[in-house]
Amino acid sequence: MDLDIKKHYPKDWMVLQNRVVECFRGMSLDEKRLFIMATPLARTTKISSNDPIFISSSEFAKECGIDLSTAYTALELATDRLFTRFFGYTTAEGNRVKIRWVNKVIYLAGQGGTELYFTDEVLLLLRTFDALNPYTKYKKEVVLRLKKDYSLDFYHLAKKHQTMGGFQITLDELFEQLGLPESYQDLSNLKKRVINSSLDEITTNTDIDLSYENIKRGRSVVGFKFTVKEKPKPKLIASTRDPNTVDMFFEMSDSQINMFGNQLSKLPELGKYAVGNEGYEALASRLKDMLKDPEKQKLLVPHLKKLGFNPKSS
């Protein structure tokens, strides 16, 4: 049965098919953060490979808990590097497929942000979740502020296998999936700088406890057994305000305003907001300003919903 991803997995969730292995392989920490911020936006909106996902430096700094002064350079470098990355999966026929995550990137120096264009096949992988396409999901806010280089990798693996209580992985598989350099072939260095530091950060700052033990063949360590335990969930106080209230103003991120403003400008029925013979770009700028205005935004909400905007997840 197909899942309604808009209802169950809004933009604050990271969701990815399990057949996509090595998804973070070789990525820097900032690349992983950029990827985790961008993919939910691609999944929850009706974009194609011709439409950009915009991430601003200010938004990158805020969500990742870093200084804005360093976010500009970090985002630009992460954008350049992400363009070179690819992932792989195996088809039902046993064929090995490799695909680039993005087919185009643009760093907008004047706007202090970046545009990512995902391939059509990637967009399909980000949106199809059913019995034939099992998947891994977790709240992006949980992982975006992790600071160790490989914490995101271990967290993703842990959530992927959480229902089974954990997973086992050989040394060779660990090096392959994480893209670890040769300097970590020394077991004590691997444990200290990669495994222990990552697991400590995950257990301290996320929703799970993650521990491990050695798997030995004779006296040699050949792999590791990881145990995943979910922490007790805190009690939440439900909001008494109806998100469908007509006078409610929906806070939108810079990337949402940029993306939806561009899409709204191409709707024929919104041509009435154009002044004179101005083109799509000028109209898009005008509509973006309307999205920031509590009163004017109300006029655009019905059109936003047609484009996939979900107020309940904002």
Image (tube, helix red, strand yellow):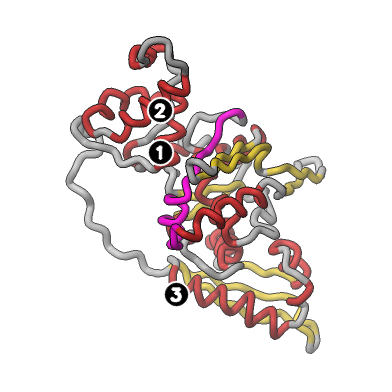
Please say whether residue 28 is visible from this viewpoint: yes
Q: Which residues are magenta?
A: 50-68
The mark lying in front, picked from 3 and 2, is: 2
Q: Residue 288: x percent and y percent? A: 37, 30
Pointer 3: what residue?
Answer: 204
- Residue at image position (76%, 76%) is 183
- Residue at image position (47%, 50%) is 57
- Residue at image position (44%, 74%) is 204
Alpha carbon separation for disc pair 3 and 2: 43 Å
Q: Amino acid at mark 3?
A: Thr
Query: Are the residues tagged 1 and 2 within 8 Å (C-beta)?
Result: no
Quarter occupied by residue 7: top left
Is 163 drawn above or below residue 231 in the view shown? above
Query: Are the residues tagged 1 and 3 within 8 Å (C-beta)?
Result: no
Pointer 1: what residue?
Answer: 7
Q: Give the secondary structure at mark 3.
A: helix
Pointer 2: what residue?
Answer: 285
Q: Residue 68: x percent and y percent? A: 44, 58
Q: Residue 156: x percent and y percent? A: 57, 60
> Is residue 18 located in the magenta-colored stretch of the structure?
no
Who comes first in sequence, dot 3 or dot 2? 3
